[in-house]
Image: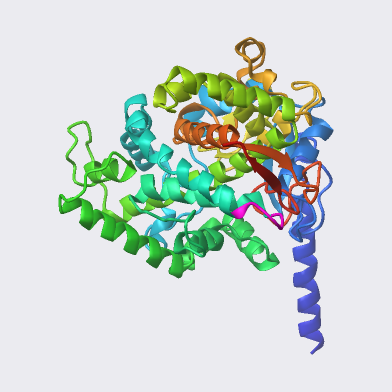
């Protein structure tokens, strides 16, 4: 018995020593780091502080002392660059050494996880090249009517439902985004603005809901122990969700290939790749690969658009002078185009675009960018080597809220994004969609969709922030993304 006790004490002692020793990684390399907590490092898995705030604290504490800050993801070291020139090197100049994200995917056991966001190496390069034509000006213009189509339903929903007891504006934005992305990604009429409890919204909730400690720990586990998760053949996406999307995409493909429908959307391009009908395409996709790309286009576009739309409407609602200016611009442009918000008219909503840009500065959905070193990387003009496999956290939110870059960063000021002001800033001072070859492929589509939705809302309604909304907005630590704690409640008054 005593032998087993000694053995247990020895194992625990070794484990304690190993973990404590792992926290010397950055001090051994003269990289500053906020003191880690035993076992969890610089994380807060109990959900008391949002991850974006943890990264920002590290950035704010040491940005003046060093071009890099250390970070511990449990016991595993990560690195945060604070110098904008260094960030530019990682994202653009030396991209080939930081081309991967090191995000979990498992093509065999979890096929929907093998999408453009997580893929690596040559496969990512091929798929990125194949899918990029979806978002050229010509293709965007063809998809534009599919976006405009849902503004009538959006305005009808606001008139019908946004009265009486205050309602969380998040649900309005989610319904609109689901309808638009569902139609363009799957050719699916979701009717989320017309019906309650649609299946597509339920799947979205299933994908993005991390309100329990168990779900957050699962998320951290897949980020930290990717190889182990693959070995154990674990799934990140629930089987229920996979069955739903596989069924939807399979039925859509069969319907399109029957020749009964021809629509200019993401599905059409995917089918061209899958069937190798485009002469510029050198490699076709399997059905599973196609399904994975449609899957991420939906969820990537759904979440970013929905959240940005919510925050932008909230800021416009509490800044009436800005709202009046957006409304005036919208009506002048509409008058020029005979009352129709054409694709060309949408491009002329300059001030509204500045409002969207300022929203993305203050509330970037991609608040931290992930990159992984493919080989050892000697940092220029430094003795530091970022070792192969090291994950880099690009602190987007921290940069966007840096008072040395954006004075009074908590003030909503669209004039920060006049052409003159943009030219006077470092190009890496504003990266809500990332930058370089691995930036967000759907950026232009998202901006177009936001401009259409918000201009239509402001043209038809006066927005005011309901007193139930807690300001200033604080990110809910229980959310993976940066949703506001307590929700956003907006009162709408019809103008037409």
Q: Report the front residue among 38 and 107.
A: 107
* Image: 460 above or below 351: below
168 on left or right of 237: right
What is the quadrant of the N terminus in the image? bottom right
For image coordinates 67% across by 26% down, the residue present is: 324
417 on left or right of 372: right
Specify the principal SS of the magenta part: loop
What is the quadrant of the C terminus in the image? top right
> In the image, which residues are magenta?
161-166
The image's colouring method is: rainbow
| Residue 134 in the image, given as x and y percentages of width and height | 34, 34
**Name of the residue lying farthest toward the front:** 496
For image coordinates 22% across by 41% down, the residue present is: 272
* Image: 31 above or below 188: above
Quarter assignment of residue 89: top right
| Residue 209 in the image, given as x and y percentages of width and height | 61, 60
Magenta-drawn stretch contains 165: yes
**Name of the residue lying farthest toward the bottom:** 1
* Image: 42 above or below 458: below
Q: What is the number of callouts on the image?
A: 0
Q: Is residue 331 visible?
A: yes
Q: Report the front residue among 323 and 355.
A: 323
| Residue 414 in the image, given as x and y percentages of width and height | 68, 23
| Residue 481 in the image, given as x and y percentages of width and height | 64, 49
52 on left or right of 258: right
* Image: 108 above or below 65: below
Quarter assignment of residue 85: top right
For image coordinates 63% across by 15% down, the residue present is: 418
Magenta-drawn stretch contains 389: no
Quarter assignment of residue 263: top left
Q: Can residue 67 be seen in this view?
A: no
């Amino acid at each position: 018995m005593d032998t087993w006790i000694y053995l247990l004490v020895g194992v625990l002692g070794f484990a304690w020593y190993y973990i404590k020793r792992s926290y010397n990684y950055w001090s051994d390399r003269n990289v500053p780091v906020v003191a880690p907590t035993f076992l969890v490092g610089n994380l807060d898995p109990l959900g008391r502080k949002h991850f974006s705030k943890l990264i920002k604290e590290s950035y704010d504490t040491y940005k003046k002392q060093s071009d890099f800050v250390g970070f511990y993801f449990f016991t595993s070291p990560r690195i945060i660059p604070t110098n904008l020139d260094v960030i530019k090197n990682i994202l653009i100049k030396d991209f080939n050494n930081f081309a991967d994200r090191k995000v979990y995917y498992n093509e065999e056991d979890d096929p929907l996880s093998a999408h453009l966001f997580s893929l690596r190496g040559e496969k990512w390069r091929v798929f990125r090249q194949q899918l990029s034509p979806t978002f050229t000006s010509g293709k965007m213009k063809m998809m534009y009517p599919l976006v405009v189509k849902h503004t009538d339903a959006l305005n009808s929903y606001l008139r019908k439902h946004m009265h009486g007891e205050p309602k969380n504006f998040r649900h309005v934005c989610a319904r609109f985004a689901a309808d638009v992305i569902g139609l363009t990604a799957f050719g699916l009429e979701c009717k989320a603005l017309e019906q309650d409890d649609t299946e597509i919204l339920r799947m979205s909730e299933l994908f993005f809901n991390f309100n329990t400690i168990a779900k957050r720990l699962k998320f951290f586990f897949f980020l930290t122990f990717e190889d182990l998760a693959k070995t154990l053949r674990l799934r990140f996406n629930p089987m229920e969700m996979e069955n739903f999307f596989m069924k939807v995409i399979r039925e859509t493909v069969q319907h399109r290939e029957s020749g009964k429908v021809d629509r200019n959307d993401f599905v059409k391009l995917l089918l061209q790749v899958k069937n190798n009908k485009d002469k510029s395409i050198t490699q076709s996709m399997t059905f599973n690969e196609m399904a994975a790309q449609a899957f991420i286009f939906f969820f990537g576009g759904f979440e970013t658009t929905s959240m940005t739309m919510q925050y932008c409407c909230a800021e416009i609602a509490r800044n009436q002078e800005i709202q009046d200016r957006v409304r005036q611009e919208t009506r002048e442009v509409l008058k020029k185009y005979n009352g129709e918000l054409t694709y060309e008219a949408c491009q002329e909503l300059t001030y509204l675009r500045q409002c969207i840009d300022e929203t993305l500065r203050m509330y970037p959905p991609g608040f931290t960018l992930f990159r992984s070193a493919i080989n050892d990387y000697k940092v220029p003009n430094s003795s530091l080597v970022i070792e192969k496999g090291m994950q880099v956290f690009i602190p987007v939110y921290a940069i966007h809220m840096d008072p040395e870059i954006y004075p009074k960063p908590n003030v909503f000021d669209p004039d920060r994004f006049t052409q003159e002001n943009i030219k006077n800033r470092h190009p890496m001072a504003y990266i809500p969609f990332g930058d370089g070859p691995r930036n967000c492929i759907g950026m232009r589509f998202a901006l177009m969709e936001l401009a259409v939705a918000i201009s239509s809302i402001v043209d038809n309604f006066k927005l005011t922030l309901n007193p139930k909304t807690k300001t200033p907005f604080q990110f809910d630590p229980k959310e993976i993304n940066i949703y506001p704690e307590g929700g956003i409640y907006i009162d709408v008054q019809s103008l037409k």
